[in-house]
Amino acid sequence: MRALLQAFGNPRLEVVLWSGERINASDASPVATLHIADRATLVRLCTDPDVQFGDAYSAGRIEVEGDFELLLEDLYRGAAERRGSIGVARQLAERLHRRPRNSLSGSRDNIQHHYDIGNEFYELWLGDTMAYTCAYFPSRAATLEEAQRAKMDHVCRKLRLQQGQSVVEAGCGWGSLALHMAQHYGAKVRAFNISHEQISYARERAQAVGLSDRVEFVEDDYRNISGRYDAFVSVGMLEHVGPENYPELGRVIHRSLSPHGLGLIHSIGRNRWKPMNRWIDRRIFPGANPPALKQMMDIFEECNFSVLDVENLRLHYAETLRWWHANYERARERVAAMFDERFVRMWRLYLLGSIAAFSSGEMQLFQVVFAPGRSNRIPWTRSDLYIAG
């Protein structure tokens, strides 16, 4: 146990074993106490902490008292700064892990695993906009719904959307951004998504607000996008594409974007690439692969796209996740009734771990604006991006 704690940078943690023995990782006051139920759980945890911590917590064999979010932030920071005696076992487990592929069929399976578990579940905690991507908080006092609408406006301003322009969206979620672009900016939108549950939900929303003639929701893969558009936008899809497919994505954008158009990609990312945590890859988000900025350039270079603007909103994502987690905990009994207690704990850990990842700098949130390399119809300054809504 001490070797494991050292490998994670000796976080501010007290561990209580099944025997009642207590182990302190640090001289500092602990922010949380970890209760381990039995010897077998400890052995599994020390053998493969990246997967076994999540599984043991989900099963109730590990309990956490105290500030769980702050503990996870300590673990992320400590693991990034130090490599202890557990490092070899972790490296071996990583090499043996078979990650889902993002082929045409594989992508559909991966998306269904995460998004097609029921729209009712996501309605419990995403808020009125049903936007499952980083919000933009223009002030600390903004609510989640205000921040999600501010994010959509922020994206539309970066794209300089005008009345009557055409937009193609790759990966549209439950349709919030597509509907926002049509309703508030007068755009005509084609939005692609391979989640059947999300597409059905988005079409119902478009019908309900009278925008079916302005927004077309297409249940298909981004690789099958056709037509020419004034703007290309993708918010929260690149994580599911995989770096091996970035050149193909670039070619899709190249054939779809008009010579004077603008594009925007909004994606979770990293300062330096490494594979997604294996527990998340197995239990929550199969196939997810957040890129480094260097990898994202594989989308743009081959097709001679000019990168115009890069913004990092990682602290906004941490705040977004805090809102989602608070909503989730208020709905935990309904979540348990839909699924079971193990599911409740699994998704709690996923949300808290995500907050910690963005707060600690383990994860980033990039918005990249780009244009065809020969286009001179590009923004002269950035002064209009931050106008009051």
Image (spheres, rainbow, N blue to C red):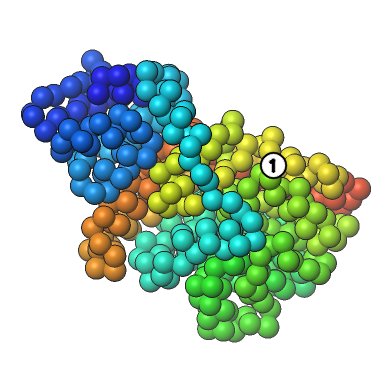
| Left or right: 312 as drawn, with respect to 24 | right
| Left or right: 134 as drawn, with respect to 166 | left
Q: How many marks?
A: 1
The residue at the far front in this view is: 96
10 Å neighbourhood of mark 1: few (<14), some, or many (≥20)?
many
Which quadrant of the rendered structure holds the N terminus? top left
Residue designated by label 1: 296
Q: Quadrant of residue 180?
A: bottom right
The residue at the far top in this view is: 27
Using the image as rendered, state which of residue 273 and residue 129 is in the foreground: 273
Q: Amino acid at mark 1?
A: Met
Instruction: Give the percent coordinates (x, y) of residue 291.
Output: 61, 41
Image position of 383 with respect to 334: above or below: above
Using the image as rendered, state which of residue 351 and residue 96 is in the foreground: 96
Residue at 70% from the left image edge and 71% from the top image edge? 189
Residue at 25% from the left image edge and 37% from the top image edge? 67
Image position of 188 with respect to 277: above or below: below
The local secondary structure at tag 1 comes to helix
| Left or right: 302 as drawn, with respect to 249 | right
Instruction: Give the percent coordinates (x, y) of residue 352.
Output: 35, 44
| Left or right: 200 as drawn, with respect to 319 | right
Instruction: Give the percent coordinates (x, y) of residue 39.
Output: 17, 33
Which quadrant of the rendered structure holds the C terminus? bottom right
Image position of 10 with respect to 101: above or below: above
Q: Quadrant of residue 209?
A: bottom right
Instruction: Give the percent coordinates (x, y) of residue 185.
Output: 68, 68
Residue at 32% from the left image edge and 43% from the top image edge? 54
